Amino acid sequence: MWGDVFYNIETKTFTKKSDNGLNPRSFVHFILEPFYKLLGFTISNEKTELMPFLKTIGVYLRKSDFLLDIKPLLKLVMQKVFGDLRCFIDSIVEYCPSA
């Protein structure tokens, strides 16, 4: 996924060359684009696009959750997608030196 690995959408294969910029990097195609869609749909409060997108990744919310303000809704969606990240944040605070 990292580095110069490109995804050919037509043949559904990974290549080392971009073919004149037609093939996206695999990290962008599989990680960044879905993450940006998730953030964009949640922040723009587009319930008609957010609900089917969440369903495709296996995240289900109650209808009352969609009535939340943007910040609590974003927090809820991120918790459902990525799980509880408190242990990750605690380990960063404990083991990574301060800048």
Image (cartoon, rainbow, N blue to C red):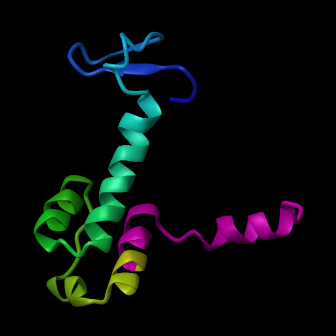
Q: What residue lies at 42% left-to-right and 69% top-to-bottom? A: 78
User: Residue 13: image x %, image y %?
Assistant: 33, 15
Residue at position x 26%, y 65% from top?
A: 41
Q: Is residue 15 left or right of residue 4?
A: left
Quarter of the view holding residue 37: bottom left
Q: Nearer the viewer, residue 38 or 90?
A: 38
Q: Which percent across, then down, holds residue 57?
A: 26, 54
From the viewer's perspective, is 24 left or right of 56? right
x and y, in percent, of residue 60 in the image:
22, 69
Give the farthest residue toward the front.
Answer: 20
Please name the predominant secondary structure of the magenta segment in the image. helix
Residue displayed at 38% across by 78% down? 76
Q: Is residue 90 magenta?
A: yes
* Residue 95 appears left or right of 36: right
x, y percent for residue 96 = 84, 60
Residue 21, placed above or below residue 82: above
Compared with 4, 59 (above or below) is below
Q: Quadrant of residue 50?
A: bottom left
Residue 45 colored in magenta in the image? no
Above/below status of 37 relative to 25: below
**Residue under the point 43% across and 78% down:** 75
Which region is colored magenta? Answer: 76-99
User: Which quarter of the rendering shows the C terminus?
Assistant: bottom right
Quarter of the view holding residue 77: bottom left
Give the number of callouts: 0
